[in-house]
Image: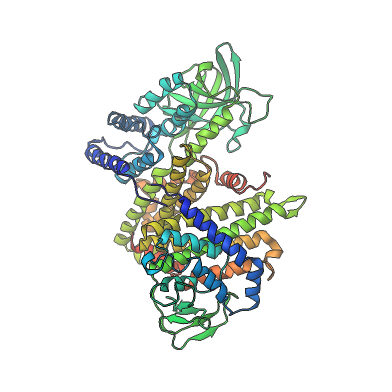
């Protein structure tokens, strides 16, 4: 139970802090949150700065503790989050780094790190959301390529992506979990159609993806044929394990801002509201400690986070939604003004209990894999 | 940074768990329920010998020389086994009240809410208990008196009480899961029903969050972090005991099931030391 960071880790933190202080004032103005091409350019520009300064690899090569420090410091400084690079940096990238061949790592990792290429996530289908294993998009082997036909949905960042981490069914006759493969799909391949979907926040951060006899080289398959489910579980453990670290820090910062606003506009005098903010604050600090524990465990067991991520995600997604509901209470009539960033974020946060496995699915995972309760319906 | 338990800390937990399993198992617990108000002095002495009270006293003062992180681990176990008596007050008195460190003296104190647990059984009372009036305590294992005045809360007492709450939260989760894996209804164990599974998963989430909060607060010793940990631990203990009772169904509502004992103790711990609204105010004030 040691929360002290080593000298080397503190030195890393100090250097990063210094760099951030010098770099952030030089950033261009943030684009409109609804403008995805603008956000792609902005997010990739930021990633390029990180890369040039030697921090581009931090999500993959650094130790879990260094990654924690990186996310903590960048968020504390108010630096841009990964944004359009979420899938590339925190999802497909770590998966290729862990499961890809040397050629695949050489082809795909560097462009993500340099902010040259953006990835999207092609997991869900109209008939396979949380029940991912029931996906039907088919890939039929034809020489040195797979011919892929099917439809994906909720494809994050598809509008601006160069590559898609695509789950396809390569064996329609085998057991559901065994006939799936993980492919890197070039988004400019003939037969790929992207139709952006508007979220309830008005944003087009995800899309429908139609695949009509798209030829994907067999060399683009990461992991063995029909072993895509296992590869995907590696991906998801990253997503649930460390992808949200920075957001806990963000929530603690937001809570501080909210308290300041409440003190200024008089809402702080309401004890019920004050206590609600206190409870939220206690929860986010505990989530930070839980994160430090998960990272310690990841560090000790070789880097891949475990099911502890589901425990984290369950509390986090509900707590963050409650944060925005409390913000609306503090803001009063201003809560209806979408020109204030709080309110757009409030709308976006409605996805937290759905995306990356609904809370109901997470509870099943916790109950079955941690508590050992039987599978059932 | 390595926020996991060290090997020494895991050994410490195993030691106290073995001691309590042998010395305060279910039969002893139920015997204590049947004799309300009687404190087992033999057990008190054994806990003293095991270092529960002297844990944080320096070695040159006859203590064990460990810190708050180790103390919260031991108090979590004490909470899990529902050990009766003013453990936190006696631990806090070690080094200043003769005999407390060795488990020879039972020390209680006036809580911040004007309540005194175990007044009749205690050898020493800290705080002003003048005018104490007996209360018909909701918890059969915690006799209570009410006093006109009230004290404050030492942060360490708050934290150790929170640690006991984590013990109850963990016990409730394990008891519910164990029952859900055995009890059959409609031709299958009830743990296969999603409604039951989700209750159990929620219990684990609350326990892990509260435990991380208590451990973090034990390492930093920060009073605001301690207040936040108490808040989460109270919620975890009370909500988990209730959910555990729910999972046990009709059996859970009986005197014979132990669930109610944990719930009642969780209520007592929540109300005695830095109750929820006050803890929330303390955390909010630091925002």
Q: Height in image: A1 above or below B248?
A: above
> Which is more toward the observer, A250 or B146?
B146
Identify the residue at image location x=57%, y=77%. Answer: B39
Residue situated furthest top in the rendering: A143
Q: Which residue appears at 53% of the width and 52% of the height?
A: B205
Looking at the image, residue A225 sits to the left or right of residue B108; the answer is right
Picture coordinates of residue A229, whole percent (x, y)? 58, 30
Residue B244: quarter of image: bottom right
Could one spot residue A169 in this view of the protein?
A: yes
Quadrant assignment for the C terminus of chain B: bottom left
- On screen, residue A39 above or below B176: above
The vertical placement of A347 against B244, above or below, is above
| Residue A243: quadrant of the picture | top left
Can residue A123 be seen in the rendering of this structure? no
B85, B65: nearer the viewer = B65
Is A253 rendered above or below residue B144?
Answer: above
Q: Position of residue B181 (x, y in %)?
A: 69, 52
State the residue at coordinates (29%, 60%): A264
The picture places residue B9, in percent across and down from the top left corner, at 47, 55
Residue A45 % position (x, y):
31, 30
């Amino acid at each position: 139970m040691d929360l002290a960071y080593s000298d080397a880790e503190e030195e890393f933190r100090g250097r990063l802090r210094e760099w951030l202080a010098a770099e952030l004032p030089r950033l261009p103005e943030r684009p409109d949150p609804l403008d995805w091409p603008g956000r792609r350019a902005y997010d990739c520009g930021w990633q390029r700065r990180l890369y040039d300064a030697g921090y581009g690899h931090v999500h993959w090569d650094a130790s879990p503790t260094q990654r924690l420090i990186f996310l903590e410091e960048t968020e504390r400084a108010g630096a841009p989050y990964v944004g359009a690079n979420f899938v590339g940096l925190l999802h497909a990238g770590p998966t290729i780094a862990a499961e890809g061949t040397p050629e695949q790592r050489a082809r795909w990792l560097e462009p993500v790190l340099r902010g040259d290429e953006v990835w999207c996530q092609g997991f869900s289908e109209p008939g396979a959301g949380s029940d991912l294993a029931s996906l039907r998009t088919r890939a039929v082997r034809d020489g040195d390529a797979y011919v892929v036909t099917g439809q994906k949905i909720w494809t994050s960042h598809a509008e601006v992506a160069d590559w898609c981490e695509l789950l396809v069914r390569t064996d329609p006759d085998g057991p559901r979990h065994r006939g799936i493969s993980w492919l890197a799909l070039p988004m400019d391949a003939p037969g790929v159609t992207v139709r952006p979907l508007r979220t309830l926040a008005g944003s087009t951060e995800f899309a429908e993806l139609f695949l009509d006899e798209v030829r994907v080289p067999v060399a683009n398959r990461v992991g063995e044929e029909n072993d895509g489910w296992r590869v995907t579980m590696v991906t998801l453990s990253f997503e649930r394990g460390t992808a949200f670290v920075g957001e806990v820090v963000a929530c603690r910062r937001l809570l501080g801002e909210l308290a300041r606003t409440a003190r200024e506009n008089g809402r702080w005098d309401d004890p019920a509201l004050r206590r609600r903010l206190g409870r939220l604050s206690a929860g986010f600090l505990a989530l930070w400690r839980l994160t430090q524990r998960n990272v310690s465990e990841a560090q000790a067991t070789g880097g891949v986070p475990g099911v502890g991520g589901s425990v984290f995600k369950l509390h986090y997604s509900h707590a963050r939604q409650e944060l925005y509901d409390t913000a609306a209470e503090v803001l009063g009539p201003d809560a209806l003004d979408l020109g204030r960033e709080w309110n757009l974020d409030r709308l976006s946060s409605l996805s937290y209990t759905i995306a990356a496995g609904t809370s109901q699915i997470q509870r099943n995972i916790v109950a079955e894999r941690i508590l050992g309760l039987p599978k059932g319906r | 940074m390595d926020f996991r338990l060290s090997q020494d800390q895991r050994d410490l937990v195993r030691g106290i768990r073995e001691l309590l399993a042998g010395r305060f198992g279910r039969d002893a617990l139920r015997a204590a329920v049947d004799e309300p108000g009687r404190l087992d002095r033999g057990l008190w002495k054994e806990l003293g010998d095991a270092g529960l009270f002297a844990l944080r006293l320096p070695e040159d003062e006859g203590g064990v020389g460990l810190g708050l992180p180790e103390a919260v681990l031991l108090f979590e176990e004490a909470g899990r086994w529902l050990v009766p008596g003013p453990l936190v007050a006696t631990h806090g008195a070690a080094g200043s009240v003769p005999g407390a460190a060795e488990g020879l003296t039972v020390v209680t104190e006036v809580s911040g809410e004007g309540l005194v647990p175990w007044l009749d059984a205690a050898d020493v009372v800290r705080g002003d208990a003048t005018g104490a009036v007996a209360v018909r305590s909701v918890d059969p294992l915690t006799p209570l008196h009410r006093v006109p005045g009230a004290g404050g809360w030492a942060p360490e007492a708050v934290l150790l009480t929170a640690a006991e709450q984590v013990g109850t939260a963990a016990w409730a989760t394990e008891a519910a899961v164990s029952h859900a894996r055995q009890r059959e209804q409609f031709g299958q164990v009830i743990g296969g029903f999603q409604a039951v599974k989700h209750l159990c998963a929620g219990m684990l989430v609350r326990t892990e969050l509260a435990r991380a909060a208590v451990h973090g607060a034990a390492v930093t010793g920060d009073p605001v972090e301690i207040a936040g940990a108490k808040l989460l631990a109270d919620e975890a203990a009370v909500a988990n005991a209730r959910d555990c009772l729910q999972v046990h169904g009709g059996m859970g509502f009986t005197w014979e099931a132990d669930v109610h004992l944990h719930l009642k103790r969780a209520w007592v711990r929540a109300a005695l030391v830095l109750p929820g609204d006050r803890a929330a105010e303390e955390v909010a004030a630091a925002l």
